[in-house]
Amino acid sequence: MTHPYARELGDFLRARRSRLRPADVGLEPGGRRKVTGLRREELALLAGLSTDYYQRMEQGREVRPSDSVLDALAAALALDDEERRHLFTLAQAARRPVPIPADREPERVPDSTRRLLRVLATPAVVLGRHLDLLDWNPMAEALLGDPDGYPPERLNMLLLMFDDTLTNDRSCPDWEQQALDYIGMMRAAVATDPTHPRATAIVGELSIRSAEFRRLWARHDVRESVRGTKTFRIPEVGDLVLDWDSYPLPGNPGPMMLVWTAEPGSPNADRLHLLASLRATRARCGPAAPGQ
């Protein structure tokens, strides 16, 4: 049986190799090339390894690289700090015997975290390790819509982002970047447990039904924690541009809190306050009729 971490390590190395061009590392491209990135033998030469050894690493075969080999590969691949940590995480796990499946208890949000969520005066949600939506506050419901209409197993940020039946959010200029951020977070989660059934189910479903997901997942990008900016198109208040940040919560691995904020006193802060007021009015008056 192929070691799950060795397979992930091989996929990661192959993706990072394919993004480099010979000119990036001071090599002449030479005649006609069958691959878009570096050849295996070129990367092996740069890292001071035999081509056969490196090829076995990419194929996920029984190879347990030392830290010095990993350092050489990280340098040859021009990895940033986050990618380098990911490389070491996968390789160190691949050195150990195939793990016995762990007890995977359902993820729960502590009462103290739920209280914190409710007192925040800005949209915030709690996500599980595989981006399942575990809890949210009223401001998040006003911003994102009411999650209660979805079955619990569909309340996942990746599944929702790639759901063709929702909205035309993919026309937003920041859609692909946020998709890459969420995918990178999922990659980081997979690195801690490649055979987790929840991760397998989400990635498997999206790989089958979404060419966009397959393309972005194949990049093998990884994100440990993320922040960014997102534009929300809300008819009642207009375009709303918010900053978002992720905050890890206690646990190993624990959930994270995702919080959206606006610069105080800015037009976006005014629109966010208006959205909150509209939601409060709807809550007092009862649910609106369909289409309103």
Image (cartoon, rainbow, N blue to C red):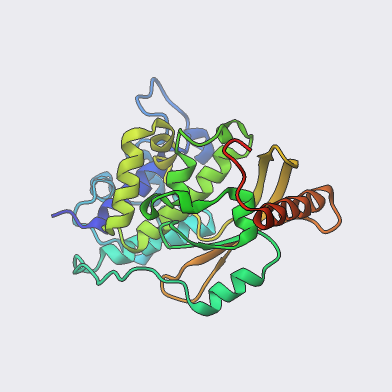
Residue furthest toward the top? 32
Q: Is residue 183 left or right of residue 6?
A: right
Does residue 55 show up? yes
Residue 221, position in %: x, y? 46, 48
Indicate the quadrant where residue 139 lies: bottom right
Q: Is residue 123 left or right of residue 110?
A: right
Front residue of this view, candidates 113 and 79: 113
Q: How many marks?
A: 0
**Based on the displayed image, in which of its 4 quarters is residue 6 positioned?**
bottom left
Q: Is residue 169 left or right of residue 10?
A: right
Which x, y percent locates residue 237?
A: 75, 42
Q: At 50% from the left edge and 60% from the top edge, which residue is drawn?
A: 224
Quadrant (top left/top right/bottom left/bottom right) for the C terminus: top right
Nearer to the camera, 140 or 26 = 140
Say which of 62 and 290 sits in front: 290
Q: Position of residue 22 (x, y in %)?
A: 47, 34
User: On the rendered structure, is 128 left or right of 2?
Assistant: right
Residue 184 visible at all: no
* Residue pictured at 26% horizontal, 45% vertical: 55
Q: Where is residue 36 shown, x and y percent of the image?
A: 42, 29
